[in-house]
Image: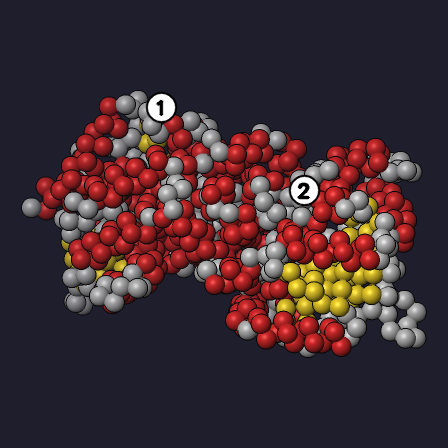
Amino acid sequence: MSSFTDRADGALADRQLKIAIERTTGTAQAKRAVAVAAFPDFEAARARAAAIKDHVVANLGAYLEQFEASATAAGTQVHWARTADEACAIVIDICRAAEARSVARSKSMLGEEIGLPHALAEAGIGRVETDLAEHIIQLADERPSHIVWPALHKTREQVSELFRRHHRTPHEGEEIAAMAESARRHLREAMLAADVGISGANFLIADTGAAVTVTNEGNAELSLVPPRVHIVTAGIEKIVPSTGHAIHLLRMLARSATGAALTQYTSFFAGPRRAGEIDGPQEMHVVLIDNGRTRMREEGLAEMLRCIRCGACMNHCVVFRQIGGHAYGGTYPGPMGAVLTPALDGLTANRDLPNACTMNGKCQEVCPVDIPLPTLLRGWREKSWREGLEPTATRSGINAWNRMIASPRLYRLMSAMGARALRTVSRGGWISRLPLAGGWTRHRDLPRPPAGGTFLDQWAKRRR
Amino acid sequence: MTERRTVALFVTCLVNVMRPRIGFAAAAALEAAGCDVVVPRDQTCCGQPALNSGDREGAKAAARRTIAVLEGYEHVVVPSGSCAGTIRAHYPEILADDPAWLPRAQAVAARTWEVLAFLDEVCGWRPQGTRLAVTAAYHDSCSGLRELGIKRQPRRLLAAVDELRLVPLEGDETCCGFGGTFCVKYPAISNAIVEEKAAAIEASGADLLLSGDLGCLMNMAGKLHRRGASTRVFHTVEVVAGMADGPAIGEDA
């Protein structure tokens, strides 16, 4: 048993979790299907989206420099971080220079990836998560279980209880509107009191120097405009050449994530408050973070850098829908997480992730940028095999099979013997218990082979 | 009479051992469609277990051996979407850096077909005078659906079976949780997936469950039987070949 299978078993036993996953991913699947069907030539739009990202990833250095120049010209300070630790240190330094006691953070998976919540806590800087789902996660002291709906694993009933425990003037009834109002009261105060606002970016626009965020709650705007300082932490692959390219990808992102034509709020942040403007921060910073992305590009994972973090792959994944996000053990769950986590956190501890997949291909089918996720997962399996990380039982099983199939005579002999052996352990037409095949028979019966031998032997007899 | 096609039947490991009827049904349908069927004696496994376990060298060895066995034939027909997909989609991929073998891999890949797609698209064949008064649910096995584009072909063939009525299956394109070695490496997850699939099949009310891959069929049939469901399970080619009057999967004496 690995820690992954332990976590998966725990998740499978959790009925509440199953209900929560089913509600959200079920709705997401249905709405996405409607949105995609209504979109004229979604396939062509998808190919264009992939081409935009591939172009950027192939010319990353040039676009990053262009972004730096445009952003600097707009008054933004641009920082470069090679690693997660460097990125956190830069953010903490900016917060300290601003004498910040509290920061308001607008949901960012990159922030989770680099461990920013933890780094802020260590630095003694108060943090308020302003996205509703992140707020729930912060109250529960948990980690996100989905990249679009971080609190997907929580049912409405569990959220109600959390709010009652933590909000100063909580909701009274059990209506969702009342719960949302309670969160609004609680969060608005914190947002307006924050010294620094921190966000991620869905896109960084090279020719204008703008950072784009999308939300459905307006929390990004309220977290980022009133404070004195706005810090953007973004992965270097978030660059697009122009606003037009960002708009194209936004159309794909919103439809693939929630089935909406566009998010409720889409904001372009380009520099701090200018002379004569009535609001906006005094300083704006963008931290451009590599954290393994350059290495991914060099080591066969360039296509993964297309990802726009819509979550469609996990919403449609049969495995994710059974075990939820926490079982994956990394920042990013589901198929995209199973590709990213071994790159970010190492393959040795995460070899289960690319293996715990049926290779059904649905994730690639729904990916708005056509990432060949099954191929990339297979790539990790191959690396795991080469590096000897696969369990001995798997290795010796596959090696024995390879030796058998290399010899047609041995193959025919073993097939015939296998068929006979299976018949001896069956009752009726079925086998309900089988040594060494408990993985199968614990949960389902195995049909027994019929009398008369294998197809190859029967055919040879009949046709001679 | 039109020229007869010569077809090599690549029967697959599971059909060879677990359900030879599918091989005979494939041969019968192909012959009815005007093909001469040969079964290359030295065929073994396409190498899918090694390929999906990350053993690329093992998969390459299986690919080279299988290509050598099959390359002399005009067409190669396989009663399985995943094994046909391995030959068609993956052999050229895994032998891409082998200049001696790549052209051979591409040539065999271009001539390899899943049996239902071959009967429909290449032969333009339809079952004639085949009658089966049942309702049937069709599950689209993932490799066939997404690697080979098999969706309408089996339905067109089944539409020509008299009195057979296809009923809708909720989630017909959703994986059944088999996944080859996945089902024994991660049995609890696989079980949770096939449990839902079996419930959907039962809810369809169909007499028969049909699909095109024996691995998936055994997974679903085994779960249905464990649940005590009465749904009978066949490979689609058994139905179109008029062989669904015999024992279903698990009914063999």
Q: In which quarter of the image is residue A167?
A: top right
Residue type of the residue flagged with mark 1: Arg
Residue B160 in view here: no
What residue is drawn where x is 83% and y is 33%?
A: A165
Q: In which quarter of the image is the C terminus of chain B?
A: top left
Where on the picture, by quarter, is residue A366? bottom right
Asked whether, in this view, residue A213 is left or right of residue B160, the answer is right
Query: Residue A160, which numbered label?
Result: none
Residue ID at (90%, 75%): A275
Q: Name the residue rendered at 79%, 73% in the picture.
A: A75
Mark 1 lies on a secondary structure that is loop
- Counting from the top left corner in percent of width and height, residue A328 is at 56, 42
Position of residue A379 measured from the top left corner of the image (x, y, whole percent)? 42, 54
How far separated are the C-alphas under marks 1 and 2?
40 Å
Residue A445 x/y as whole percent: 38, 29
Whichever of labels 1 and 2 marks the residue nearer the N terminus, that label is 2
Instruction: Judge the density around disc 1: few (<14), some (14-19), many (≥20) Cα neighbours within 10 Å.
Output: some
Q: Identify which residue, A222 or B122, lies in the foreground.
A: A222
Residue nearer the viewer, B2 or A300:
A300
Residue type, label 2: Arg
Q: Where is residue A110 in the image (x, y as percent from the top left)?
A: 66, 54
Residue A433 disc label: 1
Relative height, residue B180 to residue B29 (above, below): above
Residue A362 drawn above or below residue A44: above
Q: Which mark is residue A143?
A: 2
Badge 1 sits on which subunit?
Answer: A
